[in-house]
Image: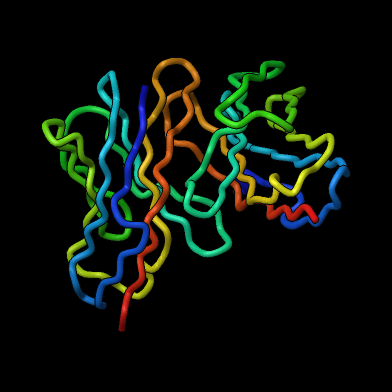
Amino acid sequence: NAGVTQTPKFRVLKTGQSMTLLCAQDMNHEYMYWYRQDPGMGLRLIHYSVGEGTTAKGEVPDGYNVSRLKKQNFLLGLESAAPSQTSVYFCASSFGNQPQHFGDGTRLSIL
Amino acid sequence: AQSVTQLGSHVSVSEGALVLLRCNYSSSVPPYLFWYVQYPNQGLQLLLKYTTGATLVKGINGFEAEFKKSETSFHLTKPSAHMSDAAEYFCAVFDQTGANNLFFGTGTRLTVIP
């Protein structure tokens, strides 16, 4: 029972580098989400997808891009990493208004 | 617009004591409310949810929450704290306006003192 799997679990980048975070879910969920978690701020929505081939901006989308080429995968890209993007990133998935299932997170540090 | 406020970023209780974590919400529509728990270095796990119906909701690990519309509250309680309850707890309201995402509170870290 994998649920939601995030890859990688940890990463350190230098300012200006690019990278892609991968989220995979095996529950056939339509909806997928990317959040970032920062101390004292809870989780904030970056981008989300309501189905294969669709994406939309959330609360804090600047500096990130996403793609949902396959229903089970949701990729989060940083084209030019900045120190302000140091955070813990969580992917989640759900059926519509049902509770979201979360991955274990990716800890990203930008130096 | 929907939002959530959690009062108290840190709460400490003695083992065996009552746990009370406060959550107030703002919503222009009847809310769907959730409590999630996050253990260190892990993702969020659903504790309980309120959508419609009974206002007292029971969740996992002995937690429960009561939806009070008149107070716009959804406080989380547990009669007797256990050491294993030490974690961070997040209250969230479901966005029913189209995005179907969750608006989270800033979290409350629960410490249980032996």
Quarter of the image for the N terminus of chain B: give it: top left
Of residues B5 and B112, the one drawn nearer to the viewer in this rendering: B5
* Location of residue A27 in the rendering, given as x and y in whole percent from the top left corner: 58, 35
Picture coordinates of residue A28 (x, y %)? 60, 29
The residue under the point 23% across, 63% down is B19
Picture residue at 74% right of the left edge, 57% below the top: A10
Q: On the rendered structure, is A13 left or right of B15?
A: right
Q: Nearer the viewer, residue A36 or A62?
A: A62
Q: Quadrant of residue B23?
A: top left
- x%, y% of residue B78? 22, 60
Picture quadrant of residue A9: bottom right
> Percent from the top left, x then y, of residue B62?
26, 59
In this image, A43 relative to B106: left or right? right
Q: Is residue B55 left or right of residue A84?
A: left
Seen from this angle, which residue lies furthest left? B70
Name of the residue lying farthest toward the bottom: B114
Which residue is at a point 72% across and 53% down the rendered structure image? A108
Compare residues A106 and B82 and report the one nearer the observer. A106
Quadrant of the image occupied by residue A52: top right
Split into 4 quadrants, where in the image is the C terminus of chain B? bottom left
Up-down: is B5 above or below B37?
above
Q: Is residue A29 above or below residue A1?
A: above
What colouring does the structure picture have? Answer: rainbow
Q: Is residue B73 above or below residue B83?
A: above
Instruction: Residue at 42% x, 30% y: name it.
Output: A98
